[in-house]
Amino acid sequence: HELDVLLNLHRFAFETAAWAPVLRLGRAIDTTLMGSGRWGAWGQVLERCLPAARQVGDVAAEAWVLHQIGSRALCLGDVETARRCLTEALDKRVALGDDTGARATRHNLGLLPPSPGGSNGRGPWRRCEPGAISSAKRSASSRSKAVIPRPASSAAVSRFTAPRRYMSAASAK
């Protein structure tokens, strides 16, 4: 119930253009939403955090949000969005000198299958924008008790496995 209150507060902060609180609250509830399987709500929070980071001009926060959106997309099997957002996050993190963040983003990029043409994600791509997560994937219930979904069946992506504590009894069999 407390998480629902925080989600409503986050939505209110976004609707009233309180950009700094949108970012602070988004970061605060990010891991909880991911870990509790509320991936629909997690996606909504990230989609509100991206324009907030851009509005306040916080490039480090923007890179973090792009990394999170890309990582979520990777787990949902949306390779195009994952590659686009993770690549943009990496560019920003490298420019900022954020070696730790860049290492994490490179790791997740490494879980993606090779891009068409073998460009390693550096080919033509459009900037990751709010709404980049496909509506079909975003429409998943934000109250879903689903656990971390298995990535797409690509050999490169299939190396990614969720920590045991996030797996349901059914998927652990």
Image (cartoon, rainbow, N blue to C red):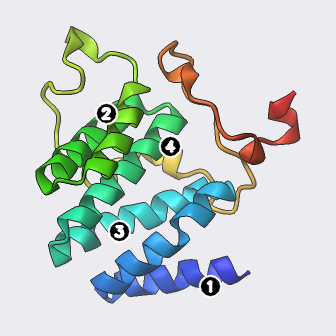
Residue wearing tag 4: 136
Q: Which mark is residue 83?
A: 2
SS at circle 1: helix
In the image, residue 40 above or below residue 133: below
Q: CA distance from mark 1 to mark 4?
A: 25 Å
Image coords of residue 12 (percent x, y): 44, 86
In the image, residue 143 above or below residue 155: below
**Mark 3 neighbour class, 10 Å CA radius: few under 14, some 14 to 19, many 20 or more:** many
SS at circle 2: helix
Q: Does 115 sit left or right of 117 as displayed?
A: right
**Sequence-wise first label, 1 or 3:** 1
Look at label 4 and name its amino acid. Answer: Ala
SS at circle 3: helix
Q: CA distance from mark 1 to mark 3?
A: 17 Å
Image coords of residue 62 (percent x, y): 25, 62
**Sequence-wise first label, 1 or 4:** 1
**Sequence-wise first label, 1 or 2:** 1
**Mark 1 neighbour class, 10 Å CA radius: few under 14, some 14 to 19, many 20 or more:** few
Name which residue lies at 51% across and 86% down. Answer: 9
Q: CA distance from mark 2 to mark 4?
A: 18 Å
Residues at marks 4 and 3 touching, judged by CB atoms closer than 8 Å? no
Q: CA distance from mark 4 to mark 3?
A: 20 Å
Q: Which mark is residue 49?
A: 3
Image coords of residue 154 (percent x, y): 51, 15
**Sequence-wise first label, 4 or 3:** 3
Residue 55 picture quarter: bottom left
Residue wearing tag 1: 5
Look at label 1 and name its amino acid. Answer: Val
Q: Does 40 sit left or right of 113 as displayed?
A: right
